[in-house]
Image: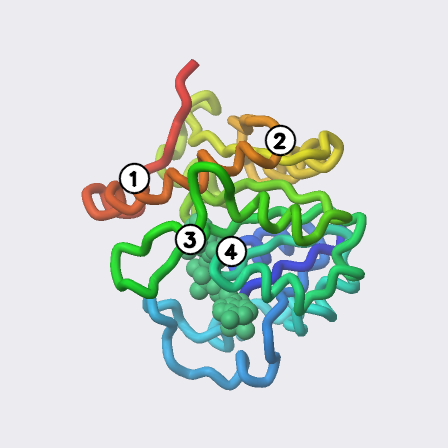
Amino acid sequence: MKIAILGTGMVGRSIAGKLRELGHDATIGTRDVAATLARTEPGAMGTPPYSAWAADHDDVELATFAAAAAGADLVVNATAGAASIAALEAAGSQNLADKVLIDVANPLDFSGGFPPTLLVKDDDSLGEQIQRAFPNTKVVKSLSTLSAPQMVNPLMINPGQPDGSQVTVFLSGNDQQAKDTVADLLRSFGHADVLDLGDISAARGPEMLFPISFRLLGVLGPMFGFKIVR
Ligand SMILES: NC(=O)c1ccc[n+]([C@@H]2O[C@H](COP(=O)([O-])OP(=O)(O)OC[C@H]3O[C@@H](n4cnc5c(N)ncnc54)[C@H](OP(=O)(O)O)[C@@H]3O)[C@@H](O)[C@H]2O)c1
């Protein structure tokens, strides 16, 4: 599949790298290709500059949000949640129409410092806002409750354990076929516990897990995950 990953951060890089390993055609989208390649400073969270990652991944193309989305069969939103609608508008609704969009973003507001708060919650979600803004796109919320490395390596916490002990990855969206496509892709990443929560309004719950995730990160470090025990 030809997949556009909008977002040059940890998440976009992890997903793009995994997709290439699996033989997909992966293009990462950014606002300004030259500016992104010219950055030499680490990001706010200490993420190495994009060019350092790209040097080891010359099989992943970097393009503008619009060029990346235009050529893709499926699109991933891995942009900062506060900027996701703007990034998707830059990608162009015509380039997203009739396509599956996996929304990985968390709607975080860093304007008041740390910890960030949620820009939307309770009776709405970023996933729903994106679906309303792009009604012809099949939005599927997923992966947002996992760390970037865990998204593409679900066994990293408990290697060697049976599949049943894997972290749970949630799905929500209005289009069943789109969710089936995403579930297949997640299984190809190694996810064995894919849990469909229903329509896109079910994105509220996973997005609202962020505050507890943030606290758990402080207590446990990055090696934890949510497991729904049935
Ligand atoms: N990091 C994690 O482990 C993790 C885990 C779960 C979910 N998430 C969510 O996944 C998403 C990506 O996270 P991340 O840490 O990889 O990267 P990030 O730093 O949150 O986002 C980087 C991307 O956002 C774009 N962006 C920032 N401001 C923008 C603006 N004003 N207009 C358009 N685009 C803008 C950047 O564009 P440029 O390329 O042009 O700079 C870049 O591509 C976030 O929503 C995050 O909450 C992250």
| Residue depth check, mark 4 versus mark 2: number of the one nearer the observer | 2
Q: Secondary structure at mark 1?
A: helix
Q: Is mark 3 within 8 Å of ligand 1?
A: no
Quarter containing the C terminus: top left
**Mark 1 lies on residue:** 212
| Labelled disc at residue 14 | 4
Q: Is residue 143 left or right of residue 34?
A: left
Label 4 is placed on what type of residue? Ser
- Judged from this view, the residue extending furthest toward the front is 123
Q: Is residue 131 above or below residue 176?
A: below
Q: Is residue 56 above or below residue 17?
A: below
Label 1 is placed on what type of residue? Ile
Task: Using a 10 Å C-alpha cutoff, classify the residue at mark 3 as few (fewer than 14 neighbours), some (14 to 19) or many (20 or more).
Answer: some
**Mark 2 lies on residue:** 199
| Labelled disc at residue 119 | 3
Which residue is rendered at x = 51% and y = 86% of the image? 38
Residue 136 or residue 230, whichever sits in front? 136
| Residue depth check, mark 3 versus mark 4: number of the one nearer the observer | 3
Q: Is mark 4 within 8 Å of ligand 1?
A: yes
Q: CA distance from mark 2 to mark 1?
A: 23 Å
